[in-house]
Image: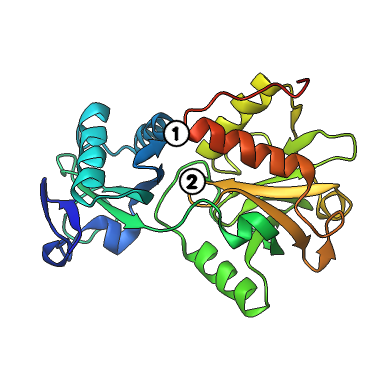
């Protein structure tokens, strides 16, 4: 049985318990992070821990422990569970208190963590690409905070799946915001990678941040701006990124074939350089 971290100690997952009056359970008053593990190494974890700290600060939940201590918990769980490939999940809620919209000032945060073994690299989706649907963005205004309030995404992903799609991208005011659990990108005919600029309307993706650095270091042009569904339909390529999907080609959007309906060459190049970085291998510039 896998080991988890709960109530400030490690324990078998079957023994972990969260109180009935935990505000994460009653109000979705909590934030979370998911870090990829490949070859037993955590990927982009500094970005994830930084975003966790920012999300907590934005809603006034104190850090349950230092970032170094949280990372130590992650590493211990990876070791205890012998995790070679998969994810480490972190969640911090405001804590337990009588059910009331107002909460006491001295409430102690609840911190849990666990690992999930799953295949992240060499997936069918990464090799062949996926089809995404489009749907109106159903979420609250502060999408830059990674809260556990995911009902909109749950229902949108289910509706997309029932419609024969692999995932869904959201649209607001005639422009794509992001995927239900990923950052959305298109590639223009002249080879520019386009994704929406960070703001309160989207989550600042950690895999996106890593890819931005890699684009800069390899000479690939990345342009931060919003794009419409119509521009996406006529794009040369499309893809999305997240900690669990890495760089996944999108070959169909709302029934429109993207490019030739196959993962594009630049998307494949980005997959390559991202995995090289994940495994600690050097990347070549685009000019080489």
Picture disc at residue 243:
2
At x 77% / y 61%, what residue is drawn? 253
Q: Quadrant of the N terminus?
A: bottom left
193 up-or-down from 27: above or below = above
Q: Residue furthest bottom?
A: 162
Who is closer to the viewer here, 151 or 185? 185
Residue 213 at x, y percent in the picture: 60, 24
The reply to whether callout 1 and callout 2 are in contact (CB within 8 Å) is yes
Q: CA distance from mark 1 to mark 2?
A: 8 Å
Q: Quadrant of the C terminus?
A: top right
169 relative to 76 in the view: left or right: right
How dense is the environment of label 1, judged by Cα within 10 Å: few (below 14), some, or many (20 and up)?
some
Where is residue 44, by image quadrant?
A: top left
How dense is the environment of label 2, judged by Cα within 10 Å: few (below 14), some, or many (20 and up)?
many
* Chain-order first, disc 1 or disc 2: 1
Is any atom of residue 199 visible in this view?
A: no
At x 22% / y 52%, what residue is drawn? 81
Residue 37 at x, y percent in the picture: 39, 44
284 up-or-down from 199: above or below = above
Picture disc at residue 160:
none
Residue 158 at x, y percent in the picture: 56, 73
Who is closer to the viewer here, 37 or 196? 37
Residue 129 at x, y percent in the picture: 69, 58
Where is residue 233, by image quadrant?
A: bottom right
At x 46% / y 60%, what residue is drawn? 150
Q: Secondary structure at mark 1?
A: loop
Is any atom of residue 85 visible in this view?
A: yes
Picture disc at residue 44:
1
Q: Secondary structure at mark 2?
A: loop
């Amino acid at each position: 049985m896998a080991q988890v971290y709960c109530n400030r100690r490690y324990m078998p997952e079957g023994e972990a318990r969260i109180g009935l009056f935990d505000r994460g359970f009653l109000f979705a008053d909590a934030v979370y992070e998911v870090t990829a593990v490949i070859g037993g190494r955590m990927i982009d974890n500094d970005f994830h821990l930084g975003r966790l700290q920012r999300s907590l600060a934005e809603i006034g939940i104190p850090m349950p422990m230092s970032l170094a201590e949280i990372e130590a918990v992650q590493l211990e769980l990876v070791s205890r569970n012998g995790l070679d490939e998969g994810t480490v999940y972190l969640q911090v809620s405001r804590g337990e208190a009588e059910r009331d919209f107002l909460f006491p000032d001295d409430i102690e945060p609840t911190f849990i963590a666990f690992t999930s073994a799953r295949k992240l690299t060499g997936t069918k989706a990464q090799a062949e690409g996926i089809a995404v649907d489009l749907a109106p963005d159903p979420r609250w205004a502060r999408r830059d905070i990674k809260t556990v309030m995911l009902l909109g995404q749950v229902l949108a992903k289910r509706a997309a799946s029932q419609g024969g799609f692999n995932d869904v991208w959201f649209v607001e005011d005639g422009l794509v915001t992001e995927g239900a659990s990923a950052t959305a990108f298109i590639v223009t005919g002249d080879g520019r990678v386009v994704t929406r600029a960070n703001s309160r309307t989207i989550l600042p993706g950690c895999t996106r941040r890593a890819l931005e650095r890699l684009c800069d270091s390899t000479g690939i042009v990345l342009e931060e701006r919003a794009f419409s569904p119509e521009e996406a339909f006529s794009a040369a390529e499309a893809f999305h990124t997240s900690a669990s999907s890495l760089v996944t080609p999108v070959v169909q959007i709302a029934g429109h074939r993207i490019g030739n309906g196959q993962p594009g060459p630049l998307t494949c190049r980005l997959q390559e350089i991202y995995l090289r970085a994940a495994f600690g291998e050097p990347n070549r510039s685009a000019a080489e």
